[in-house]
Structure formats: structure tokens, C-alpha cells
Image (cartoon, rainbow, N blue to C red):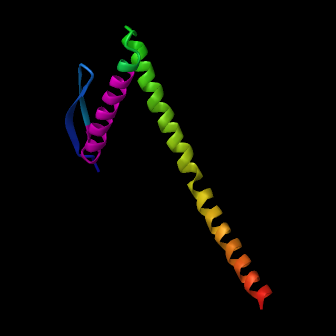
Amino acid sequence: MSERLQNIVLNIDVHKVPLRVPIEDEEVFRKAGVYVNSLFRKYQLALMNEKSLETLWMYVALHAAVELKSDERDKSLEPVITDLKKINKLINDKLKENNIVNNQ
């Protein structure tokens, strides 16, 4: 089964980036392009004296990578957080039950 692909062009800074992407991922690529542009402009303003485009793009790449790794870390903790909430509820239920028994 072959994927249906879509030709798109993203405008990243002053560059036109032609891509061939799966149709169902087109919106994600477009949003990523907007996001990368916003990061680039953020660092361009923050580092106005920086003349090196390579340095600006390094900051953009590092920023995006840190966010990606943070999201991965947070997602890997979701099952633990869910289990802790269940355990907490069981403990609270038991405490309430014992409180009622002790008061009677």
C-alpha cells in the first residue's frame, strides 16, 4: 500500500523549502514551518548583534530539541502519574472508611 503524498512549499526565513509529505501530515509540516519561523525571529531579535546565521539556526535547533525531549520525558511519566492517582484514591478511600468506622 503506497502513501498518498502532497507537494508543499514551506517558507523558512528567506528560503523556500519544497517537500513531498504524506497528505495526512501536511498540516503538521505547515505548523512546524510556522513554529520554526517564530523561533528564528525570536532569536534574531534576542541576538540582534549576532551576524552569523549558523549561530541563530543553532539556537533554533537547540530550542526545538529541548522541547521535543521535554515532551518525551513528560509522556513517559504519564503511566506512572495515572497509577499514582489510582493509588492515592485508594488510600484516601481507605482513610475515609476507617474514619467513619472509628467515629461510630
Magenta region, residue range? 21-43
Q: Position of residue 7 (x, y in %)?
A: 19, 35
Q: Give the number of marks.
A: 0
| Residue 38 among magenta residues | yes
Q: Residue furthest front?
A: 103
On the rendered structure, is 3 left or right of 78? left
At x 35%, y 19%, the residue is 45
At x 60%, y 58%, the residue is 81
Q: Position of residue 20 (x, y in %)?
A: 24, 35
Q: As displayed, is residue 48 above or below residue 27? A: above
Quarter occupied by residue 15:
top left
Q: Which of 13/99 is in front?
A: 99
Quadrant that contains the C terminus: bottom right
At x 80%, y 85%, the residue is 102
Q: Residue furthest bottom?
A: 104
| Residue 33 among magenta residues | yes
At x 53%, y 40%, the residue is 70
On the rendered structure, is 82 left or right of 98? left
Quarter occupied by residue 53:
top left
Q: Position of residue 98 (x, y in %)?
A: 76, 82
Q: Main secondary structure of the magenta part?
A: helix
Q: As displayed, is residue 51 above or below residue 73? A: above
